[in-house]
Amino acid sequence: MADIGSRFRRAISDRTNPLILDGGLATQMESYGADLSGHLWSARLLRDDPALIKRTHAAFYMAGSDLATSASYQATVAGFVRAGNSAEEGERLLRSSIRLLKEARDEAWRKIQAEGGEGGRMKPFAAASVGCYGASLADGSEYTGIYDIGKEEVKAFHLERLKLLVKEEPDVLAFETSENR
């Protein structure tokens, strides 16, 4: 990840134009007909329809996104267990969010290059979406930061997920909707 990190730092410091982020993974999957109700939100599709996740990522890259985020915003091992999976399966599903994203990116990039469409464009980045603790509760507390646990428990919560996500070597960690305390 160190080499990738330097590539990302170089990309953001050398650019005169902004990096284009994907356009909203969940919204796009819903436009394809996905039902994202439930506490796992889009992460449920890591188990139920990983091909749709990959297709959506690829569409963003093909449309010009320089950076796309994984379907892991609301994904936690505990959340997958609550949905009836084993802890081991929950770990596999969380890690698969990065694998699907990178596969989609690499396949889209090969297609873009084969069509001669890169036109000076750099290879896009794959960002691990790291939602806050409140997102895992699926009760709206991600917007308030008011939880029934302390800072040390919040740190432990993030550390467990980060250890799994970084094993798949995302280019970037995207901390989204961070706690306000």
Image: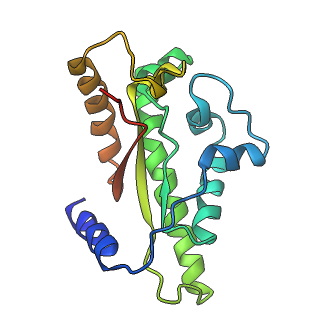
53 versus 138 height, above or below: below
Q: In the image, residue 38 lies at what x, y percent?
A: 64, 23
Residue at 74%, 33% in the rendered image:
35
Which residue is at 32% across, 54% downward?
Answer: 169
Nearer-the-camera pick, 109 or 128: 128
Image position of 179 (left or right of 67): left
Quarter where residue 42 is shown:
top right
Furthest residue toward top: 148
The picture places residue 18, in percent across and down from the top left corner, at 45, 71
Which residue is located at x 59 percent, y 57 percent? 57
Image quadrant in which you'd find residue 116: bottom right
Q: Quadrant of the N terminus?
A: bottom left
| Rendered-image quadrant of the C terminus | top left
Residue 77: percent from left, percent from top: 42, 25
x then y, percent, for residue 101: 50, 55
Q: How many marks?
A: 0
Residue at the spot x=54%, y=77% of the render?
110
Specify whether 97 is left or right of 168: right
The image's colour scheme reads rainbow
Relative horizontal placement of residue 40, taking residue 29 as reference (left or right): left
